[in-house]
Image (spheres, helix red, strand yellow):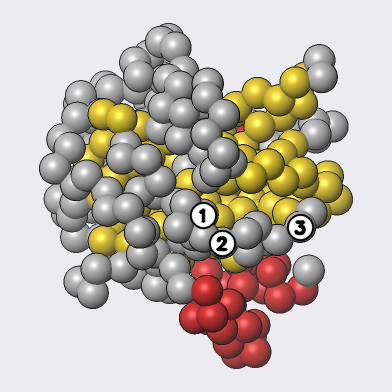
Amino acid sequence: MLKLLVTVLLVAGAYGCGRPDYTPNVRVVNGEDARPHSWPWQVSLQYLSGGAYYHTCGGSLIAPNWVMTAAHCISKGREYQVVLGEHNRDVEEGSEQRIPVNSNEIFVHPRWISICAACGNDIALMKLSRDAELNDKVKLGCLAPAGQLLENNYSCYISGWGRLATGGALPATLQQALLPAVDHAHCTQRDWWGSTVKDTMVCAGGDIKAGCNGDSGGPLNCQAEDGTWHVHGIASFVSSAGCNALKKPTVFTRVSAFNAWVEETIGNN
């Protein structure tokens, strides 16, 4: 396991991670267009249908040829590609990198149960068919340190092309919103999520600030004291009452609970 950890750390060290060249607009409170390429590890996960690819989920580039997303984003039999360097999905901006993913190189967590998101383990890794070209618009995201927990109200940002409201349309441009972390003690209160939320999950936002359909698999970005951004969460699920239900924060897979699985999967493949 130590060898695997060293391998992953060397990759991050060689290429750098979590430091965008284009500074995110961290003054945004409610959802707003993100500053172009300020979340350069953000990917659009797309599936093939009728000869065209369609956005279905987000994801994070964590190594030159590895993307981390949610297990529930993966459907057997579908062909996928990831798009890196994307901002406005309706415009060819010249920064996009479209990289196919071979179906036999998608690794869903072995304890993921597709009919039970609340059971946890909503994480998957996709090995890209070629390395991404890292530049000012495509960079690696840093994994949150193993075991690290966020303090209540810690400022984090969700990013993605998810719906702007329950049942609404998918936006063309990448969105971001401030989602303060909700610690486990608060999120598991009876009138919040209760026992639905496990300790391998992290809650953020609530009320008018939330993730929505299409954000799934995308990152919860939180800045460390040294200025580096870490991916602390993978967008997993929201309330059946809607994307912005009171006392029902967006629930993310807690990345810091799965570092060992990520390292082992990458090391073995």
Q: Which residue is mark 3?
A: 130
Q: CA distance from mark 3 to mark 2?
A: 12 Å
Lateral position of residue 257 relative to residue 109, left or right: left
Q: Amino acid at mark 3?
A: Arg
Q: Residue at x 35, y 19 (%)?
A: 164
Position of the N terminus, as image quadrant, is bottom right
The residue at which mark 1 appears reads as 138
Q: Are marks 2 and 1 in contact (CB under 8 Å)?
A: yes
Is 113 situated above or below 62?
Answer: above
Quarter of the image with the C terminus is bottom right
Compared to 98, does 260 lie above or below? below
- The location of residue 127, given as percent across then percent down, is 73, 57
* Sooner in the amino-acid sequence: mark 3 or mark 1: 3
**Mark 1: which secondary structure?**
loop
| Residue at the image position 65 percent from the left and 23 percent from the top | 54
* Position of residue 239 measured from the top left corner of the image (x, y, whole percent): 37, 25
In this image, 142 relative to 54: left or right? left
Say which residue appears at 45% left-offset and 58% top-offset.
Answer: 136
Q: Nearer the viewer, mark 3 or mark 2?
A: 2
Residue position for label 2: 134
Contact, CB < 8 Å: mark 3 with mark 1? no
45 sits to left or right of 87? right
Instruction: Specify whether residue 109 is in view.
Output: no
Which one is in front, 115 or 217? 217
Mark 2 belongs to which amino acid? Leu
Mark 3 vs mark 1, CA separation in Å: 14 Å
